[in-house]
């Protein structure tokens, strides 16, 4: 689906924000010998329904692009500034409406850079809190976290880890072994 179609179809945007778990050791990725970090995902708790968690998101304003909506909503619902994270405009996930199966929300992938940035929602009329969760914690939120969003977590974590592994592989020097000549 092209960016133009998504821009025309979605009326909401949000951010799928991950951070590397500072206190948990990583895990070896396959047979690569590369230790991939453990990750956490940022969720916000809605004031409308107790224990209703979602990615930071909201409706776009008139003439606002989805990407700008996503950054604005992340700030309003978490207090995070653009200098606290790196957001990827070309990496996004679409949530579809359950009743029409049409694109509804575009979530942009982002990575936390400032690990010490406090989570302090600005819009307290809608959001109770913003918290970090492991994927396993999210997968157990059966009632309060929709299937599509759990699938986005799975895809987002996979994409992050694959990017991490590829980066490590690309930046690992290949050592040439010299063969001793028979002497």
Image (cartoon, rainbow, N blue to C red):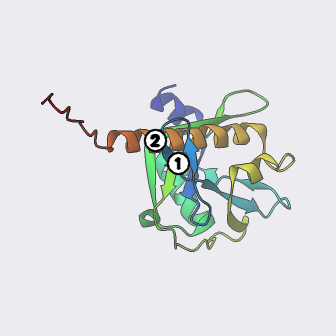
Answer above or below: position of 50 versus 10.
below
- The percent position of residue 9, horizontal first and vertical second, equals 58, 32
Q: CA distance from mark 1 to mark 2?
A: 7 Å
Quadrant hosting residue 48: bottom right
Contact flag, marks 1 and 2 (Cβ < 8 Å):
yes
- Residue 107 appears in view: no
Residue closest to the eye, 73 or 141: 141
- Total count of labels: 2
Residue closest to the eye, 5 or 74: 74
Q: Residue at x 74, y 49 (%)?
A: 136
Tell me the SS state at disc 2: helix
- Residue 39 appears in view: yes
The disc label shown at residue 6, or none: none
- Give the labeled residue for mark 2: 165
The disc label shown at residue 36, or none: 1
Residue closest to the eye, 182 or 11: 182
Tell me the SS state at disc 1: strand
**Sequence order check: which comes first, mark 1 or mark 2?**
1
- The percent position of residue 107, horizontal first and vertical second, equals 58, 44
Q: Residue at x 79, y 30 (%)?
A: 99
Q: Residue at x 52, y 44 (%)?
A: 160
Is residue 143 shown left or right of residue 124?
A: right
Q: Residue at x 63, y 56 (%)?
A: 40
């Amino acid at each position: 689906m092209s960016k133009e179609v998504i821009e025309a179809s979605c009326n909401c945007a949000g951010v799928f924000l991950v951070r590397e778990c500072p206190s948990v050791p990583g895990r070896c990725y396959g047979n690569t010998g590369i230790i991939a970090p453990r990750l956490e995902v940022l969720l916000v708790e809605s004031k409308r329904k107790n224990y209703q968690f979602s990615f930071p998101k909201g409706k776009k304003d008139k003439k606002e692009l989805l990407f700008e909506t996503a950054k604005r909503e992340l700030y309003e619902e978490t207090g995070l500034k653009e200098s606290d994270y790196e957001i990827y405009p070309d990496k996004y996930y679409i949530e579809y409406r359950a009743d029409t199966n049409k694109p509804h929300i575009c979530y942009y992938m982002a990575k936390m850079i400032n690990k010490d940035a406090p989570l302090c929602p600005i819009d307290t009329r809608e959001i109770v809190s913003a918290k970090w969760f492991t994927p396993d914690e999210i997968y157990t939120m059966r009632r309060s976290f929709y299937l599509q969003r759990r699938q986005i977590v799975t895809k987002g974590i996979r994409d992050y880890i694959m990017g991490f592994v590829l980066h490590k592989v690309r930046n690992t020097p290949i050592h040439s072994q010299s063969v001793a000549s028979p002497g």
